[in-house]
Image: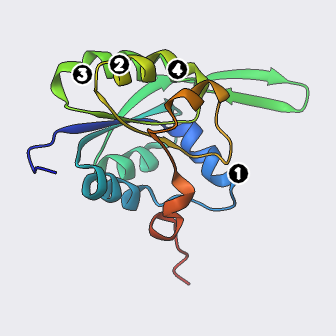
């Protein structure tokens, strides 16, 4: 691999966070950014995240770690057992991947969501797909067609897990 590689990552933060938690661990986002840079030559990592007032310290941490945060307003949905917060970022992730299309050699999509099927298919067909990093034990069966690109984040748990400093 040459050093001239200019790869970008497009990360569905909620899918990543919930997927890793479902496997029993917490992701160290700063380590993950370094991992993306070192292993996959990621120059820019776009992190798509719902914006919640009061989470400014989290957003500052993520930006300091090297992510370009793309915020989406959240929706609060009243449910009988409380309030559900939704910050669906799928459209933003697809849009930004295409806006940046001419600026990168290859892309990594971090999500196991089948909603990204058409994006992954387009990138693969145009030789712009590097990897699909799936954070869940199981990912959408729609993505099976792209198994050569898929890697489970669990393989890198020992490098990426947040460690308690106690």
Q: CA distance from mark 1 to mark 3?
A: 31 Å
Comparing 156 with 78, the one in front is: 156
Q: Secondary structure at mark 3?
A: loop
Q: Which mark is residue 125?
A: 2
Comparing 13 with 19, the one in front is: 19
Residue position marked by numbered label 3 in the rendering: 100
Q: CA distance from mark 3 to mark 4?
A: 18 Å
Comparing 100 with 140, the one in front is: 140
Residue at 43%, 55% (x, y): give it: 29
Residue at 24%, 20% (x, y): give it: 101
Q: CA distance from mark 4 to mark 2?
A: 12 Å
Q: CA distance from mark 2 to mark 1?
A: 32 Å
Q: Secondary structure at mark 2?
A: helix
Q: Position of residue 79 (x, y in %)?
A: 85, 24
Residue position marked by numbered label 4 in the rendering: 117
* Image: 159 above or below 120: below
**87 sits left or right of 1 in the view:** right
Q: Quadrant of residue 15?
A: top right
């Amino acid at each position: 691999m040459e050093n001239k590689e200019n790869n970008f990552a497009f990360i569905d933060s909620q899918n990543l966070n919930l997927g890793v938690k479902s496997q029993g661990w917490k992701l160290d986002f700063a380590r993950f950014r370094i991992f993306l840079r070192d292993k996959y030559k990621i120059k820019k990592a776009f992190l798509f995240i719902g914006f919640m007032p009061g989470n400014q310290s989290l957003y500052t941490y993520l930006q300091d770690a090297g992510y370009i945060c793309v915020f989406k307003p959240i929706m609060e949905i009243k449910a009988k057992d409380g309030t559900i917060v939704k910050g669906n970022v799928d459209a933003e992730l697809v849009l930004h991947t295409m806006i940046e299309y001419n600026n990168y050699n290859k892309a990594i999509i971090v999500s196991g969501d089948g909603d990204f099927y058409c994006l992954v298919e387009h990138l693969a067909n145009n030789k712009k797909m590097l990897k699909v990093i799936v954070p869940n034990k199981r990912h959408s069966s729609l993505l099976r067609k792209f198994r050569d690109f898929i890697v489970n984040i669990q393989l890198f748990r020992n490098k990426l897990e947040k460690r308690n400093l106690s």
